[in-house]
Image: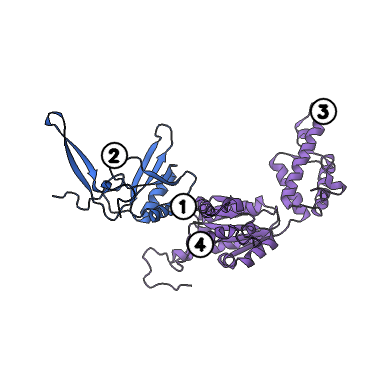
Chain colours: A purple, B blue
Amino acid sequence: MTSPEHETPSETVTAVDLRADYAASGVGEVLDELDRALIGLAPVKKRVREMAALLLVERARKSMGLSQQPPTLHMSFTGNPGTGKTTVALKMASLLHRLGYVRKGHLVSVTRDDLVGQYVGHTAPKTKEVLKRAMGGVLFIDEAYYLYRPENERDYGQEAIEILLQVMENQREDLVVVLAGYGPRMDTFFSSNPGFRSRIAHHIDFPDYSDDELFSIAELMLADQNYALSAAGAEALREYISHRRGQAHFANARSIRNALDRARLRQAIRLFDGADAPLDATALSTLDAGDFRASRVFDGGIGQKP
Amino acid sequence: MMSNQGARITQGQFSYLPDLTDAQIKAQIAYALDKGWAVSVEYTDDPHPRNTYWELYGNPMFDLKDPAGILTEINQCRKTFPNHYIRVMAFDATKGWESPRMSYIVNRPKNEPGFVVERIERDGRNQGYTIRSYATLKPEGERYK
């Protein structure tokens, strides 16, 4: 890195209080929120905390004139569906904003469709439009490996990749790019696009949730919507989770959210069909065992159906 | 006697000042975005002060949140029309305003030949005056080379 300059400007500080810096930046709140809002994901939280510390120190070094280069902040999030990549990206955007590494802290979430055009000359303007929109914030490219299609050498995705790489390199202070996708396919993507790998400083891997974590997530989701589980309902949900994991199209927290939505549907029809007396608030907001046990998951699952 | 030596046209904000630097333009855009105005880039090669209909470059940028994106667009426009007048406008859509709140030139031709005063005789030898840019003697697109 750079050594202290002799002609340091007069406004450089000579000592920093990291604790005070930490409190003033509001980073603590974001990290706490991350802890509270996201169940599990211990390695991810650890990485985010490390990055926050690094950025805080980097900022302090900059205020002392010890570093001139803005750090590379582009990230890649790999993990299975429904492991919280988008949610963490949102938090990351507000973290970077509070530390002053991006100016606005908004998240622009795009997929291949938003970047790649359909005919010659369509891709560049489209990609640039998205990049302009994301400036001052974070550009989140979901399922980034779709950008690169090796089987079609005339695919326009390559053009989008080139523009992206150029902006990632030259306008590092203007925006941060986060690539997200499922692990193995991202690895192939990176190995066929070495330019990306070298421009991305932080690779964060999102592990799958355990059954207990999924259950806590379900409880959190239900509490948000003012629903509760009966004792038998909780038991049924636990069983549901362990059955569901082995079946096709399992998408961690997203599967759970869908399961809860369907349980609410069944609860509604149960109340509607069986209502002969007025219902109280508890009845309206309790999910029972039957609401889960009616699911296909319990008799063999959804794997056979397309 | 020449009163305006460089024949620089003076339209919109900051036009009596030296040309704005990119950092200054960015700061002005940031001000407009903070106020919630829509910023757009326009160009023309007809410098007459009554010419209010400049061409819009690209799309109006309603959805951009950061000056860097708009500066990219300005630089793109400068590359396409290096010898045109380019201005940045900030439009306020609030009811009651519904009009541009800022407008300033960010690019001008290297050579600005200035204006000629023309006199016309009207009824009863009354004299009328008008101005005309030397540049507009040539057709559109060939005026500043």
Q: Separation of disc 4 and disc 3 at Cα?
A: 63 Å
Relative horizontal placement of residue A146, taking residue A104 as reference (left or right): right
Task: Tell me which chain the residue with mark 3 is part of.
Answer: A
Task: Tell me which chain the residue with mark 2 is part of.
Answer: B
**Image-quadrant location for residue A289:** top right
Q: Nearer the viewer, residue B63 or A39?
A: B63
Q: Nearer the viewer, residue B109 or A22?
A: B109
Look at the numbered disc 3 and give the secondary structure of its residue.
loop
Q: Separation of disc 1 and disc 4 at Cα?
A: 15 Å
Tell me the residue that label 4 is attached to: A166
Q: Separation of disc 2 and disc 4 at Cα?
A: 41 Å
Look at the numbered disc 2 and give the secondary structure of its residue.
loop
Is the residue A80 above or below the residue B117 in the image? below
Look at the numbered disc 1 and give the secondary structure of its residue.
helix
Tell me the residue that label 1 is attached to: B69
Is the residue A40 above or below the residue B123 in the image? below
Relative horizontal placement of residue A301, taking residue A48 as reference (left or right): right
Relative horizontal placement of residue A188, taking residue B112 as reference (left or right): right
Task: Tell me which chain the residue with mark 4 is part of.
Answer: A
Tell me the residue that label 2 is attached to: B50
Q: Separation of disc 3 and disc 1 at Cα?
A: 58 Å
In front of the other: label 4 or label 3? Answer: 4
Do pointers 4 and 3 mark residues of a single chain? yes
At horizontal 76% and vertical 50% (from top left) the residue drawn is A215
Provide residue B50's location: percent of width, then percent of height.
29, 39
Name the residue type under label 4: Gln
Do pointers 3 and 1 mark residues of a single chain? no
Tell me the residue that label 3 is attached to: A275
Provide residue A57's location: percent of width, then percent of height.
52, 64
Q: Separation of disc 1 and disc 2 at Cα?
A: 30 Å
Do pointers 1 and 2 mark residues of a single chain? yes
Tell me if label 1 and label 2 are in contact, CB under 8 Å: no
